[in-house]
Image (tube, rainbow, N blue to C red):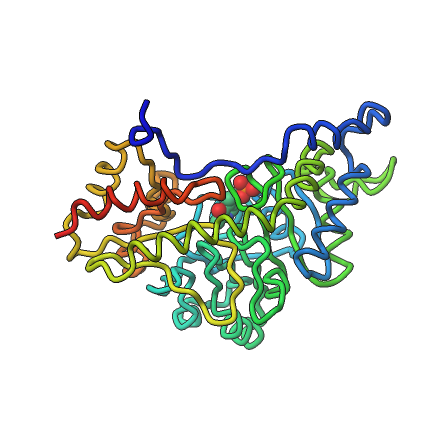
Amino acid sequence: MSEQEKEILVTRSALPPYAEFIEAIKPIWDSAWLTNMGEFHQQLEQELKTFLDVEQLTLFTNGHLGLEMVLQAMELTGEVITTPFSFASTTHAITRGGLTPVFCDIDPVTCCMDAEKIEALITQRTSAILPVHVYGHICDVEKIERIAKKHNLKVIYDAAHTFGETLNGVGIGRFGDAAMFSFHATKVFHTIEGGAVSYQGEWLKERLDCLKNFGIINKEQVVAVGGNAKMNEFQAIMGLCNLKHLSTELEKREQVVNRYGERLAGVKGLRLPEQQAGVKSNYAYFPVLFEDDFALNRNEMYDWLAGRNIHARKYFYPLIPDFDCYLEQFGQADIPVARYVAERVLTLPCYGSLTQAEVDRICDVILEVKR
Ligand SMILES: *Cc1c(COP(=O)(O)O)cnc(C)c1O
């Protein structure tokens, strides 16, 4: 297969050097301690607290269960205002918790929840707002906080895309009452599967530690209807290893994103992501909007790229309220901006080991069709 034909997937997991990981897991053969909040679980929790610049942090076996459990820990009721433009996890966490999602439209530039449209959706039954920092773009955290204070609502951010980001030097996990990070294999930082919730205050720490271990607090006492969401020691060691190499991964991603910018900026009909003031980016994704004055529409571009062995992703499409499991109940949501973006967006391949030659090949294929 020539370089031109080599398959390029939308992402590729970063792995630590093999020998380093093998060395790091050796102690497990002495201790035979595989899970249940072992030594490496504790160590990763501490290191991430520092790295993410957050007050409190609880690890989970994946981000989704962290989100479910923080909603449970907060004892929310009724309705939760959220975004239709996200991964299935965000809304599933709400509905699986017996709560009702209410969909707020998004901002056309950041693709995050449009804070101007939140208040009109608040009712007597609203108990929380669950926005998503989409693609690593940061929500209007100040306005959301003002609204939440005024109406006495909790704010839980789905921060799955924002590992390591800061806003004006402050860790992104410090905004809102809690924030969920995902450490899934496809994310900027991963523990194979994994995740964490950050928050302020001791009371949540106790509840989350308890909920993720079946609600058990000691050998003879079970105090809550918890689940099983403990991160195991192999996951934690993968995280500790990856954390050591994260700055290199971020530098490489920055080069990928900058190269896309150099090649695609100013092309009529393409809308590229904008750098937000005060935000330290993690270069997680490179979303491009194929607007109506571009030669191919999004679906045609997706097929055109796939025909040349380049796999982009319609991320996010379909919108959550349009999923088969939600369509009947929520398909009529008033979300015109989300619908506009979902029809036009493609995230291009973006990961540290993507070479400049590969980015150029992707851009050449895109630009070949420009009018
Ligand atoms: C990845 C992701 C999740 C789920 O995280 P997991 O760790 O895979 O459970 C939730 N929300 C968004 C926006 C994500 O991208």
Q: Is residue 222 visible?
A: yes
- The residue at the point 67 percent across, 45 percent down is 244
Identify the image quadrant of residue 166: bottom right
Residue 122 lies left or right of residue 164; in this view the side is left
Tell me the quarter of the image containing the N terminus.
top left
Residue 174 lies left or right of residue 113; in this view the side is right
Image coordinates of residue 204 in percent, x first then y, are 72, 56
Image coordinates of residue 314 in percent, x first then y, are 33, 43
Which of these two is toward me, 277 or 115?
277
Which of these two is toward me, 112 or 320?
112
- The residue at the point 21 percent across, 48 percent down is 367
Q: How many marks?
A: 0
Residue 224 lies left or right of residue 3; in this view the side is right
Q: Is residue 90 visible?
A: no
Question: Residue lying farthest left?
Answer: 371
Residue 170 lies left or right of residue 353; in this view the side is right
- The residue at the point 17 percent across, 54 percent down is 294
In the displayed structure, 126 sits above or below 25; it is below
Which of these two is toward me, 132 or 290?
290
Image coordinates of residue 267 in percent, x first then y, are 22, 58
- The residue at the point 74 percent across, 50 percent down is 47
Image coordinates of residue 122 in percent, x first then y, are 46, 68
In the displayed structure, 222 sits above or below 257; it is above
